Amino acid sequence: MKKMITVLAAALVVLAPMFAQTNKEDIKRAHKAAKAAEKTLKKEGYKPFELGPAVTNLENYFLKVNAGCTTIVGTSGPSVSSNLGKVTALANAANEYAMLQGGEVRGRITSSASSLSGQQLDNLVASFERLVNKNIRGELVPYASFYKEKGGQYQVRVYCIVDQDAAARARRYAMEVALEEQELAEKYGSLISDWIAEGFWKASEQR
C-alpha cells in the first residue's frame, strides 16, 4: 500500500507540470482572443457595462469558449437607454438560441422519416422554439456586456454562456409540452426517450 501511494505521488509530480502547461496555454489563448475582441469593440465605439478592465471579463468568457461551453452573443438595435438595450440583447440571445435548437429538432425529425405532415412539423417546431425561448433566459449567464451611444440611442452587445445541463432540461421540457400542445404526445412521445438515449440533447448542445 505504501509503495502504491509512493508511485501515485510520483505520477502526480510528473503530471502536474503538464496540467499547468495546458492551463497556461488556455489562459494565453483566451487572453489573446480577449485583447482582440476588446480592440474591435473599442474601434466600434463600445464601452463596458461592468467595472474593471473589460479584457478580464472577456478573458473569462473565452476561457469558457475554449473549454467547449455553449456560447451566444446577444445584440440590440437602438434603444432609449443602455439598460433597456441590455434587456433586449439578452432577449435576442434567447431567441437566437431557441431558433438554433428548433433547427436541430426540425432536422432530427425530418431525418427520422416520421409521418408528421409539413404543417404539423412547423407547428411543433414553433411551439418548441417559443417554450425554449421562455425557459432558457434564466440559464443565459452574461460574462461581458458592452454599449455604445449615438444621438441619444444605445446599442448593446452581451457575451453569454449557456448552462448546458439546465439548457438540456429546458429543451426536453419544451419538447414534452410542445407535443402535448399539438396533441402529438401519444403518437410521438417516444421521441423524447429515444433522443435522450441517443444523447441527442447533449450532442446538439456541443455544436
Image (spheres, rainbow, N blue to C red):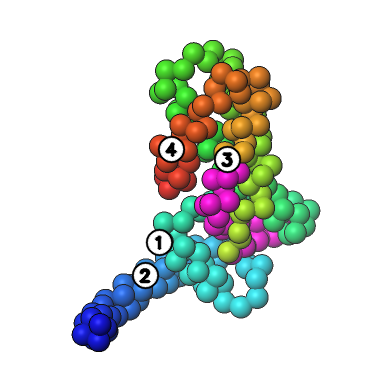
Indicate the secondary structure of the residue bearing disc 4: helix
Please name whichever residue, 150 or 192, is drawn nearer the observer in this view of the structure. 192
The three-letter code of the residue at mark 4 reads: Ala
* Residue at point 66%, 25% (across, down): 180
Instruction: Estimate the spatial distance between the alpha carbons at disc 3 and disc 1, rounded to whole Å.
Output: 24 Å
Residue 126 is covered by the magenta coloring: no
Q: Which mark is residue 197?
A: 4
User: Quadrant location of the C terminus?
Assistant: top left
The three-letter code of the residue at mark 3 reads: Arg
- Asked if the residue under mark 1 is in contact with the one under mark 2, i.e. CB atoms within 8 Å, the reply is yes
- In this rendering, the label closer to the viewer, 3 or 4: 4
How packed mark 1 is, by other alpha carbons closer than 10 Å (few <14, some 14-19, many 20 or more), is few
Q: Is residue 22 above or below residue 3?
A: above
- In this rendering, the label closer to the viewer, 3 or 1: 3
- Mark nearer the N terminus (3 vs 1): 1
Q: Which mark is residue 26?
A: 2
Q: Is residue 188 above or below residue 21?
A: above
- Mark nearer the N terminus (2 vs 4): 2
- Mark nearer the N terminus (1 vs 4): 1
* Residue at point 46%, 17% (across, down): 114
Instruction: Estimate the spatial distance between the alpha carbons at disc 2 and disc 1, rounded to whole Å.
Output: 7 Å
- Mark nearer the N terminus (3 vs 4): 3
Span of residues in magenta: 144-170
Q: Which mark is residue 171?
A: 3
Residue position marked by numbered label 1 in the rendering: 66
The three-letter code of the residue at mark 2 reads: Asp
The three-letter code of the residue at mark 1 reads: Asn
How packed mark 3 is, by other alpha carbons closer than 10 Å (few <14, some 14-19, many 20 or more), is many
Q: Is 102 on the left or on the right of 138, as rendered?
A: left
